[in-house]
């Protein structure tokens, strides 16, 4: 009997792993829903693993080896999927972000990664890793700027951000860096490439005070929500959870300044920073 099919990392490892999962599931006589119950995930999630649209996690690989009697096949080959420019907790979110037709994001403290300039990204990465070698910081910055190339397309994805006023006021990198990044955001708004609203301090308490939120929408798949906190994050596809996140975002939009008023605030704060930078 031939052994388990070995993945070729030079072709699409995730697609090959998904194809093998489908083969072994069907051979075991299990539906996607039945296998999902074994992994405590939905049948649709199993379908996304099989189609290669979702990343298989190590704990899922171990359970699949047990249920499908795959003799460590999934654990061994799951390692091929771990190669990423991004931290483990964000790797799959970054991949899905690149496929999204629309992205809606609430940023409570930092300018979103897709809108950052090189100097701003470098200041953020250095703050996260104050003792890291400069080459490591440069690698992180390059990866972040490559993500921002998503907005090079004139229409897709739709990007709509709600920025807490704190993102404008927090002096990341100093006044010159802040002036540059806010002028960059304003330029994208004026080019009608993005929609941005500012949630002012005067809005008071709101539903998303516990952290950041990113919603991603797709033409051929259900929406996803990504929630992040200190050095960790989670991608959610449960419909109830995603609906809750959509409601949260809608409430943020309702309490934010209009796009026109938001642009005026962003440009005003940018000019204040630019004037301050000129004094030094």
Image: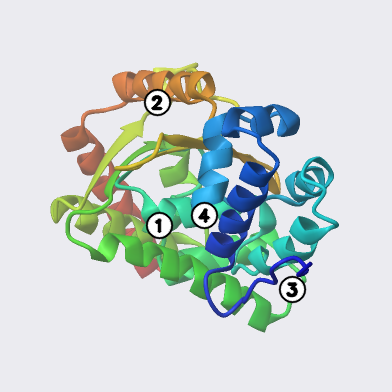
Residue highlighted by disc 4: 52
**Is residue 232 rendered to the left or right of residue 203?**
right
Judge the density around disc 2: few (<14), some (14-19), many (≥20) Cα neighbours within 10 Å.
many
- Judge left or right: residue 121 versus residue 34: left
Q: CA distance from mark 1 to mark 4?
A: 14 Å
Where residue 126 appears, as percent x and y from the top left, is: 64, 67
Q: Quadrant of residue 223?
A: top left
Marks 3 and 2, the one that precedes in the sequence? 3
Does the CB distance between marks 2 and 1 fall below 8 Å? no
Q: Which mark is residue 132?
A: 3
Task: Give the mark toward the camera: 4 or 2.
Answer: 4
Q: Nearer the viewer, residue 202 or 228?
A: 228
Viewer-nearest of discs 1 and 4: 4
Q: In the rendering, at what x and y percent does residue 37 appear?
A: 69, 27
Residue 131 drawn above or below residue 272 = below
* Secondary structure state at the residue bearing disc 4: loop
First reached walking from the N terminus: tag 1 or tag 4: 4
Q: Quadrant of the C terminus?
A: bottom left
Q: Callout 3: helix, strand or loop?
A: loop
The Cα atoms of the two marked residues, 3 and 2, are separated by 35 Å
Q: Residue at x 73, y 34 (%)?
A: 39
Q: Quadrant of the N terminus?
A: bottom right
Can you tell which of label 4 and label 3 is closer to the viewer? 4
Instruction: Work out whether residue 109 can be spotted.
Output: no
Q: Position of residue 127 (x, y in %)?
A: 65, 61
Of marks 3 and 2, the one in the foreground:
2
- Disc on res. 249: 2
Distance between the Cα atoms at labels 4 and 3?
34 Å
> Does label 4 or label 2 sit earlier along the sequence?
4
Residue at the spot 33% in from the left edge and 34% down from the top edge: 198
């Amino acid at each position: 009997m031939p052994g388990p099919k070995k993945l070729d990392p030079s072709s699409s490892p995730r697609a090959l792993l998904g194809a093998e999962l489908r083969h072994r599931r069907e051979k075991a006589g299990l539906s996607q829903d039945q296998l999902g119950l074994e992994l405590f995930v939905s049948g649709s999630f199993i379908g996304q693993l099989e189609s290669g649209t979702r990343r298989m996690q190590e704990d899922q690989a171990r359970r699949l080896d047990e249920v499908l009697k795959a003799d460590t096949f999934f654990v061994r080959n799951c390692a091929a999927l771990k190669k990423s420019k991004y931290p483990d907790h964000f790797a799959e979110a970054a991949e899905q972000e690149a496929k999204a037709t629309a992205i809606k994001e609430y940023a409570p403290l930092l300018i979103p990664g897709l809108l950052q300039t090189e100097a701003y990204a470098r200041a953020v990465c250095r703050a996260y890793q104050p003792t890291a070698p400069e080459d490591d910081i440069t690698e992180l910055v390059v990866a972040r700027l490559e993500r921002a190339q998503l907005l090079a397309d004139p229409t897709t994805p739709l990007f709509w951000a709600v920025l807490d006023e704190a993102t404008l006021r927090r002096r990341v990198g100093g006044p010159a860096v802040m002036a540059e990044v806010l002028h960059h955001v304003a330029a994208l708004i004026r080019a009608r490439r993005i929609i941005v609203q500012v949630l002012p301090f005067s809005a008071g308490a709101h539903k998303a005070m516990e952290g950041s939120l990113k919603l991603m929408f797709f033409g051929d798949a259900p929406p996803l929500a990504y929630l992040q906190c200190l050095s960790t994050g989670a991608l959610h596809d449960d419909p109830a959870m995603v609906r809750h996140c959509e409601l949260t975002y809608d409430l943020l939009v309702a309490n934010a300044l209009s796009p026109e008023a938001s642009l005026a605030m962003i440009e005003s704060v940018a000019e204040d920073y630019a004037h301050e930078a000129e004094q030094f």
